[in-house]
């Protein structure tokens, strides 16, 4: 068989959605094409069709094409247009080939589908779109299409970044956000520096050099020219007899004069008011799939979930063990040295993913990590020995403090549990320095005993 014949037989099957086949009929079909072409009357209908197909797990990774030029490829949910059928067939075949390398459960949840989509389209970016209707001013169309009805896609993006599944490509914009609700729409108003009234006006104030009196320019105007209303001195030359005062604003409520008003930003979403300097900056980037994200798409590996915990004063395991060995030796010589060691086992990561989804499990672990961050100090060390066990080294910690910390850690899963009942299951074991036995105990043996106490 010739190469040309093999190529013709390998051409993907393409269905066209239009007058002959509606999007509803395609979504109900049992036999799926290799690619879909959308031939719809306007861009709004085209966008709705693309969103509907990307939201369907069966079509999420399918090559989708449109019959009009794609102006912004990174913002479009389509893979291209039908200008060249040879290019369409080649692109569809390339996507299908890359799909064959993905993990089996790639369509199981929205996050897996998003990672797989980016992996099967090399060079494709997650690009921001400025939308005044969006509470956060910018949104990511591709993220919205795969979010699976999540309440807040921006939180999902934050979790993906913390897990290092995505990495920034380019800085698009810098905006200010409300510290209370994270909204990005504000009304800016200047107000009195004394009483915070908004009833202020800008005017010209003059300063008499003879008596030091300050008043509005209108108060200085007399029938025979400029005259100080207080000392009645004739003012002829600016810079010699008088000058403009630094104050240029006056409050109609309290009559205070001031040079610059206070600028306040009122959030149009929550109606809270903040000084402009108190508005945190948010950087808007475009993103691409990282090497960790590509690995997760190909293998379904959940190791990226632990990157959320690795941000907490993380130390390499060998460094952690050497530090613990040093503290054990120090305790043998100086009995006043106190420290604690905590072993935390995350028992049900796989079960949590199966019960909810990979993205929701990541959000639960992220919430757990943030709560744990609030409990540990900057001098504490954290490490992981595997995908289940986390370790904390707590210098200068008495047994009573260690007991309190253990109680608080054990209470964390209840604080981050799902409303439907899905929760992170943990087990905790601890070691206080006053529990040391006579003789030398290496850190590896101590950690082995703590891990064994949880089994």
Image: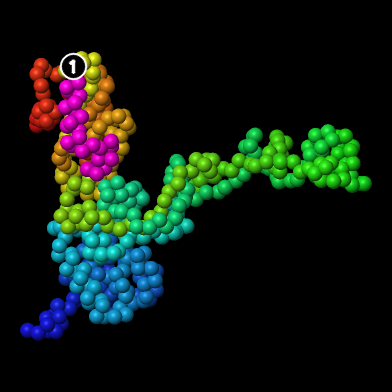
| Residue 85 in which image quadrant | bottom left
Residue at the spot of label 1: 333
Work out which residue is located at the far left of the displayed protein and give it: 1
Q: Where is residue 330 in the image (x, y as percent from the top left)?
A: 20, 21
Secondary structure under tag 1 reads: helix
**Quadrant assignment for the C terminus:** top left
Residue, x 15% and y 62% (percent of image)? 101
Seen in the picture, residue 407 relative to 195 is either above or below; the reply is: above
Seen in the picture, residue 315 relative to 300 is either above or below; the reply is: above
Closer to the camera in the image, 24 or 89: 89
Seen in the picture, residue 146 relative to 279 is either above or below; the reply is: below
Closer to the camera in the image, 94 or 310: 310
| Residue 88 in which image quadrant | bottom left
Residue, x 45% and y 41% (percent of image)? 179
Residue, x 29% and y 70% (percent of image)? 79
**Quadrant assignment for the N terminus:** bottom left
Residue, x 19% and y 19% (percent of image)? 331
Q: Give the range drawn in magenta.
A: 306-331
Residue 221 visible in rendering: no
Does 88 lie within the magenta span? no
Work out which residue is located at the far top of the displayed protein and give it: 335
Q: Position of residue 53 (x, y in %)?
A: 27, 65
Q: Along the horizontal axis of the image, is 349 left or right of 452?
A: right
Magenta: main secondary structure equals: helix
Does 325 lie within the magenta span? yes
Closer to the camera in the image, 312 or 211: 211
């Amino acid at each position: 068989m010739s190469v040309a014949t093999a190529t013709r037989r390998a051409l993907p099957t393409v269905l066209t959605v239009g007058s002959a086949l509606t999007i509803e009929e395609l979504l109900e079909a049992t036999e799926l094409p290799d690619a879909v072409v959308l031939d719809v009357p306007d861009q709004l209908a085209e966008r709705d069709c693309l969103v509907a197909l990307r939201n369907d797990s069966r079509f999420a990774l399918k090559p989708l094409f449109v019959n009009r030029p794609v102006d912004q490829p990174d913002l479009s949910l389509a893979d291209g247009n039908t200008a060249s059928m040879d290019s369409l067939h080649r692109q569809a075949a390339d996507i299908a080939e890359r799909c064959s390398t993905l993990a089996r459960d790639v369509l199981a949840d929205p996050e897996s589908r998003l990672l797989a989509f980016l992996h099967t389209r090399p060079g494709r970016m997650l690009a921001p779109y400025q939308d005044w209707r969006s509470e956060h001013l910018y949104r990511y169309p591709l993220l919205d299409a795969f979010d699976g009805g999540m309440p807040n896609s921006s939180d999902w993006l934050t979790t993906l970044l913390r897990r290092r599944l995505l990495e920034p490509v380019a800085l698009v914009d810098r905006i200010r956000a409300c510290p209370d609700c994270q909204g990005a729409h504000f009304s800016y108003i200047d107000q009195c520096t004394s009483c915070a009234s908004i009833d202020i006006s800008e005017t010209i104030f003059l300063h008499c050099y003879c008596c030091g009196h300050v008043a509005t320019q209108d108060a200085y105007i007399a029938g025979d020219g400029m005259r100080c209303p207080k000392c009645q001195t004739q003012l002829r030359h600016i810079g010699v007899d008088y000058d403009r005062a630094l104050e240029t604003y006056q409050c109609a409520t309290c009559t205070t004069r001031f040079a610059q008003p206070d600028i306040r930003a009122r959030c149009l979403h929550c109606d809270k008011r903040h000084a402009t300097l108190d508005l945190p900056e948010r950087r808007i980037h475009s993103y691409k799939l990282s090497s960790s994200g590509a690995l997760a798409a190909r293998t379904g590996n959940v190791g990226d979930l632990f990157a959320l915990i690795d941000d907490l004063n993380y130390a390499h395991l060998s460094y952690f063990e050497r530090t613990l060995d040093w503290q054990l030796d120090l305790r043998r010589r100086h009995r006043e040295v106190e420290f604690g060691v905590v072993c935390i086992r995350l028992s049900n990561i796989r079960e949590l993913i199966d019960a909810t989804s990979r993205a929701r499990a990541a959000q639960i672990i992220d919430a757990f990590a943030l709560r744990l961050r609030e409990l540990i100090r900057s001098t504490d060390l954290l490490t992981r020995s595997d995908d289940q066990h986390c370790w904390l080294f707590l210098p200068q910690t008495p047994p009573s403090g260690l007991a309190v910390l253990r109680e608080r850690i054990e209470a964390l899963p209840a604080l981050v549990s799902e409303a439907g009942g899905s929760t992170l299951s943990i087990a905790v074991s601890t070691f206080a320095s006053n529990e040391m036995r006579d003789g030398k105990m290496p850190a590896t043996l101590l950690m082995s005993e703590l891990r064994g106490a949880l089994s």
